Image (cartoon, rainbow, N blue to C red):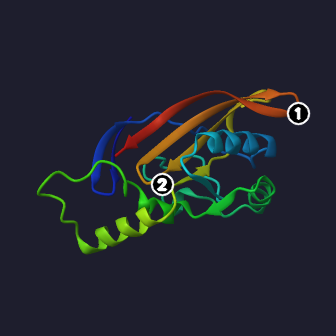
Amino acid sequence: MLKLCSLGSLVLAVQVASAQSGAGASIDPAIFQAVVQSEAAQARGVLLTDVRPVRAGADLLAIDADDLAPASDRRRDLLRRMQVQTTDILADKACMFARGVPAPPGHDALPREVAETRARCRARPEFTSIAIGEAQGGDADSVRVAVVRVTTSRYRVVEYTLGRSGAGYTITGQRDIFNVAS
């Protein structure tokens, strides 16, 4: 499916592959932990995680409040035990593209509000903010999980495939659903 997507002032026509199929149940703690650990290994700066699950069928290209389920105490407890900071990915999304390619010569005068947001975001320590979907599809031995990842220079949606490994899960594959960098 072709979809128009707006990320700040950037508008793209994107071929969309669905990362969600069907309604997701509460995520298994072992799956959640495997995804968070993988994201922590790839994070730029500190990893921040939203405790709200990404809903099945969410618009992963331009995530907003309607795409997030209510906060999960179970996720909050898991993150606390893993010593991972929590965040509001929607607030962090305001910092998307605050770093990266500079404006071309003669176009560097930004509107005051944009310049203030950009300065505030650049003053923050480097971070990677994520929101994790529920486990989807597969069977008892294999599942897929979508992750929305926001940094100050990138918006990326990744779909992980996880396989059972003893009492836990390991990442057996990952693919980009959407990836835009500045």
Amino acid type, label 2: Ile
Q: Which mark is residue 83?
A: none
Amino acid type, label 1: Ala
Regarding residue 29, the answer to whether it shows in the image is yes
Residue pointed to by mark 2: 63
Nearest the eye: 60 or 75:
75
Nearest the eye: 78 or 177:
78
Nearest the eye: 77 or 52:
77
Regarding residue 57, the answer to whether it shows in the image is no
- Side of 144 relative to 148 (left or right): right
Position in image of residue 115 (x %, y %): 29, 69
SS category of the residue bearing label 1? loop
Residue sitting at x 75%, y 49% = 26
Residue at the left extreme? 106
Q: Earlier in the sequence, mark 1 or mark 2?
A: 2
Position in image of residue 152 (x %, y %): 43, 54
**Vertical order, 164 against 21 (above or below):** above
